[in-house]
């Protein structure tokens, strides 16, 4: 796509602000049994549960752009807004023009009356196509329809696509215009660098704030820690927190951010325990949030004893357990075959005025399905529906765990009828299940089913399928899907290319024949070696006799 000269110059010169390199990189009671189908069909009349929940399972996640600063707060675009639709269509047409000037002329002659809300909304709609979004931004800038909020959004979009040099240009212009969004834009850059797995530049950006006369304060400090931790750089966040303890004294909030990284992002109980001890050494008292994170982590790894120990300790210290803690306890009790005790916790929640939500029941259904205790899981489902709570997508995913192909198809239909997918996560889960259990035929059937549910496979689906088929000995089929993946624009994957370099095998039977041939050749070579050694010994004996 031929777009702006400005962008081209940036790409050719590999522009980056010189001062980015001036800073050193900081170190880094159960109801009667219901059938699954009849139980799910009852959910159509129940309003969807939207309350936040504890998730006992860690599902696959695709690449999604999540804004930590609620950047979409001003979006007012409507699908039936003719101005917005006309502008979107025109932008996609003029984006192919050879120069920015020609594109601007066409936009100016369109007669579309732009305002700040329209430009902001269009950029959001085009967030997956940064070049066209940038064209909309530049046009809005010429019409004085761009404010600091639009700049922040554009910085976020550019950061999502790794176009940090262009984003820095916008921040510089934002600063020169003395608009009030420079600080938020810098925080967005920190978050996007962390999301791009570049903690070093995220930390440098924090220091660079002083160059824009923005003294990094405690809020920015905590934003940096959160961005690092939520993107898997908890070690760097913890080290940065400790190194800067003179400027930003250690406190419970900082430690809680790090704890959350180890407990809920990495789920590393060893590191979480270490940080918990470190808090005590630094005379930092844990609060309700601290206990919540630790109990949640103990629950996820099936540590029932420590989950209950911390729960009792928390109550002794006067902290009131909330939904997340009760859901975590219910999960670990069910997982460790203590369903009766989990139901007692459920009753205790009600006694304390906390009405169990869908996540609470999922915390029992998920481990029960995982343990192949589907009858008990259906009983819990019946109780859940009797409480006027609707199953969530996690509920359906749990019942997919042990289902065969026919059962899987039924659950998928139930999900669609309930308006809960199936989505990409659903098919990733099922594909992985069939491939892991060496059922490639069912995995291939499921691949065709995806199209019926209008789910478009992405890189994660293709990677899973190609690897799984290769491990099942179906290299020819794996290569076909790898070629299909590249033909739709998904880039090459070095790992997959390496796997597919192995000699072609039509099936696992061929693989077994190769193994047998290898063993036979090895036996022949071993016999020949023995014969040769025997011949050499006989020759030496003859020489000794002579």
Image (spheres, rainbow, N blue to C red):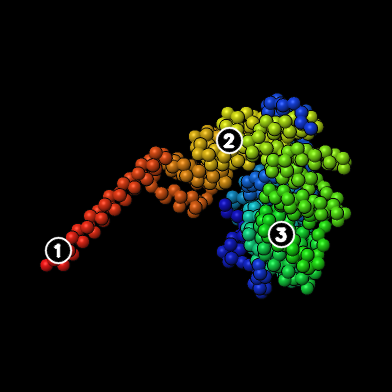
Quadrant, the C terminus:
bottom left
Q: State the SS at label 3.
A: helix
Give the CA distance from mark 3 to mark 2.
Answer: 42 Å
Q: In this view, does 115 lie above or below 453?
A: below
Q: In this view, does 535 lie above or below 38?
A: below
Q: Mark 3 points at which residue?
A: 273
Q: Whole-percent x and y of residue 512? A: 39, 42
Which residue is at 58% across, 35% downward? 450
**Residue nearest the viewer, comparing 24 with 35:** 35
Instruction: Compute the Cα span from label 2 to label 1.
Output: 76 Å
Q: Is residue 119 visible?
A: no
Residue at position x 60%, y 29% in the image = 407
Q: Does 79 appear above or below 67?
A: above
Tag 1 residue: 542
Residue 353, located in which quarter of the rendered image?
top right
Q: Which of marks 2 and 1 is nearer the N terminus?
A: 2
Q: Cα distance, mark 3 to mark 1? A: 73 Å
Residue 521, percent from left and from top:
30, 49
Give x and y (percent) for residue 404. 57, 32
Q: Using residue 233 as the reference point, say whether residue 353 is left or right of it.
A: right
Left or right of residue 261: residue 402: left
Q: Give the foreground label among 2 and 1.
A: 1
How many marks the image carries: the answer is 3
Residue at (63%, 55%) from the top-left corner? 161
Residue shown at 63% from the left, 53% from the top: 131
Residue 511 x %, y %: 39, 43
Q: Which of 98 and 451 is in front in this view?
A: 451
Looking at marks 3 and 1 on the same chain, the residue that comes earlier in the sequence is marked by 3
| CB contact under 8 Å: marks 3 and 2 | no
Residue that badge 2 annotates: 450
Label 2 secondary element: helix
């Amino acid at each position: 796509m031929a777009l702006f000269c400005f962008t081209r110059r940036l790409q050719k010169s590999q522009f980056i602000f010189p001062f980015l390199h001036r800073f050193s990189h900081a170190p880094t009671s159960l109801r009667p049994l219901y059938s699954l189908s009849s139980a799910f069909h009852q959910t159509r009349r129940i309003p969807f549960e939207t309350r936040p929940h504890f998730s006992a399972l860690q599902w696959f996640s695709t690449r999604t752009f999540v804004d930590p600063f609620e950047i979409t707060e001003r979006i007012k675009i409507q699908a039936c807004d003719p101005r917005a639709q006309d502008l979107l269509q025109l932008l996609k047409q003029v984006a192919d023009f050879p120069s920015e000037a020609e594109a601007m002329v066409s936009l100016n002659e369109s007669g579309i009356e732009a305002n700040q809300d329209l430009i902001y909304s269009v950029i959001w709609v085009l967030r997956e196509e940064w070049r066209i979004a940038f064209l909309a931004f530049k046009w809005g800038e010429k019409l004085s329809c761009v404010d600091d909020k639009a700049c922040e959004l554009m910085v976020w979009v550019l950061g999502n696509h790794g176009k940090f040099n262009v984003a820095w240009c916008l921040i510089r212009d934002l600063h020169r215009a003395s608009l009030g969004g420079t600080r938020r834009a810098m925080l967005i850059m920190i978050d996007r660098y962390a999301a791009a797995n570049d903690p070093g530049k995220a930390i440098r950006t924090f220091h660079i704030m002083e160059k824009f006369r923005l003294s990094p304060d405690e809020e920015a400090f905590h934003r940096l820690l959160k961005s690092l931790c939520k993107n898997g750089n908890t070690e760097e966040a913890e080290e940065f927190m400790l190194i800067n303890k003179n400027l930003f004294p250690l406190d419970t909030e900082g430690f809680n951010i790090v704890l959350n990284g180890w407990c809920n992002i990495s789920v590393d109980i060893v590191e979480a325990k270490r940080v918990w001890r470190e808090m005590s050494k630094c005379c930092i008292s844990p609060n309700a949030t601290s206990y919540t994170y630790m109990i949640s982590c103990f629950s996820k790894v099936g540590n029932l004893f420590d989950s209950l120990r911390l729960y009792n300790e928390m109550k002794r210290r006067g902290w009131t357990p909330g939904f997340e803690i009760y859901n975590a306890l219910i999960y670990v009790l069910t997982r460790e075959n203590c369903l009766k005790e989990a139901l007692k916790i459920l009753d205790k929640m009600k006694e304390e005025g906390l009405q169990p939500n869908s996540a609470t029941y999922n915390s029992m259904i998920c481990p029960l399905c995982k343990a192949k205790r589907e009858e008990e899981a259906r009983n819990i489902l019946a109780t859940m529906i009797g409480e006027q709570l609707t199953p969530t997508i996690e509920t359906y995913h749990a019942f997919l765990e042990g289902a065969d192909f026919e059962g899987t198809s039924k659950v998928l239909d139930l999900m669609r009828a309930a308006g809960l997918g199936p989505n990409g996560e659903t098919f990733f889960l099922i594909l992985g299940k069939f491939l892991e259990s060496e059922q490639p035929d069912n995995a291939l059937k499921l691949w065709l089913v995806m199209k019926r549910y209008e789910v478009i496979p992405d890189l994660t689906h293709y990677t899973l399928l190609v690897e799984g088929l290769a491990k099942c000995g179906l290299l020819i089929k794996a290569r076909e899907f790898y070629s299909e993946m590249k033909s739709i624009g998904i880039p090459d994957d070095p790992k997959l290319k390496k796997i597919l370099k192995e000699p072609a095998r039509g099936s696992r039977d061929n693989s077994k024949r190769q193994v047998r041939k290898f063993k036979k050749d090895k036996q022949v070579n071993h016999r020949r070696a023995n014969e040769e050694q025997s011949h050499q010994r006989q020759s030496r004996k003859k020489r000794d006799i002579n």
